Image (cartoon, rainbow, N blue to C red):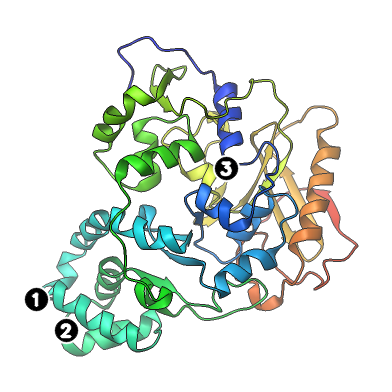
Amino acid sequence: MASRTTHPVLGTRALNRATLARQLLLNRAEMSAGDAVAHLLGLQAQNVKPPYFQLHARLAGFRPAELAGLMESREVVRMVTMRSTIHTHTAHDALTLRPLVQPARDREVTYFRKGLAGVDLDRLAQRARAFVESEPRTMGEIREELLEEWPEADPQSLSVAARCRLPLVQVTPRGVWGRSGQVRLTTVETWLGKPAGAAQPVDEVVLRYLAAFGPASVKDMQTWAGLTRLREAFERLRPGLVVFQDENGVELFDLPDAPRPDADVPAPPRFLPEFDNLLLSHADRARVVAPEIKGRTWTGNQAHCTLLVDGFLAGLWKLEGQVLTVELFGPVRKGAKEEIVAEGELMVEGMTEGMTEGMADGTAGGTAGGRADGGGGAAVRFGAINP
């Protein structure tokens, strides 16, 4: 939505640097994994390994065992929240962000109403809850349980209704680095041993979003959250915010004291997994993705891991054992390849630690199978990425 008032303009590079700073991608942060998950309002986690790669790109000295420990101690969990996708959240956010987006999950069920003819959704939620709270279940088991009461319903629609109506978490060992496990589900309340809290106040979540993704427009946040009608919250908060506009005249809101580095501040190369928060959390992604390369991070329905150079999307990567293949979209400045190699070697060293073939599920970097001690022999080569 273009602004009707003249505000200071943030050019694309300035917007890029501000966003990278919030995302902990300009300089690796001296921050715990738990604090980073909270700051980022969760990590995109459709697949198992991406949250670990997201934190390696953002935190100094990060090792996968840190996040794995938080998973096993139930301080973080994997569950469906924003945009109806799986995120890794702190326990607090799992209990309070899911209620915030629950209306959107309820609307999602209506898209499947044809396959749910005659199904009492309240009864469905009650039966599914009792079933998964007795012990964690697979989605197939949940579907079969519901088909016993509604044999004429569409099985996939029953699955969607259960996933949307209940705050289901994926229990460990699923999601634990170095281990593998089938997706089994129970409710967040049962897994954490706590009742779900009231939804986080939307104004509070707006401020947290700006701290992690700003400067941003109303539409940006709506894209991130999968929610609508957030304009009122931004207007309530406007007196305490600073307002800019982008090069297209769109209003961008921000926290007064949030970092907004100079547009010329160096941005080191960063290797990001598929589905990284940075690439999915704004309506206008030009702050990271140049228009001419839009769409190049996907082949069919396969998302690729991505490389940032000078803060912008510049290529793809794939990790197979100790061999990291990098495909650049175009020429890079002198010295950039050496920086890419150094960053790539750092990633391979840190992220093959404890990885096993049992984790090879098509997630970040492709095939696992690096040495358990994370030791030597990493090779970085430049070439084409085969989907």
Side (left or right) of 290 relative to 220: right
Q: Position of residue 5 (x, y in %)?
A: 33, 11
Quadrant in which the N terminus is drawn = top left
Query: Which secondary structure, mark 1?
Result: loop
- N-terminal-most mark, 1 or 3: 1
Towards the viewer: 23 or 142 = 23
- N-terminal-most mark, 2 or 1: 1
Residue at the (75%, 48%) spot, across then down: 326
Q: Amino acid at mark 3?
A: Arg
Q: Which mark is residue 216?
A: none
- What residue is pinned by disc 3? 296
Which mark is nearer the camera, 1 or 3?
1
- What residue is pinned by disc 2? 150
Residue at the (77%, 53%) spot, across then down: 325
- What residue is pinned by disc 1? 118
Marks 2 and 1 close (CB-CB < 8 Å): yes
- N-terminal-most mark, 2 or 3: 2
Q: Amino acid at mark 2?
A: Trp
Which mark is nearer the camera, 2 or 3?
2
The answer to which quarter of the image holds residue 374 is bottom right
Marks 1 and 3 close (CB-CB < 8 Å): no
Label 1: few (<14), some (14–19) or many (≥20) C-alpha neighbours in 10 Å? few
Label 3: few (<14), some (14–19) or many (≥20) C-alpha neighbours in 10 Å? some
Q: Position of residue 181 (x, y in %)?
A: 55, 81
Residue at the (52%, 67%) spot, across then down: 75
Query: Which secondary structure, mark 2?
Result: loop
Q: Amino acid at mark 1?
A: Gly
Residue at the (26%, 54%) spot, across then down: 104
Marks 2 and 3 close (CB-CB < 8 Å): no
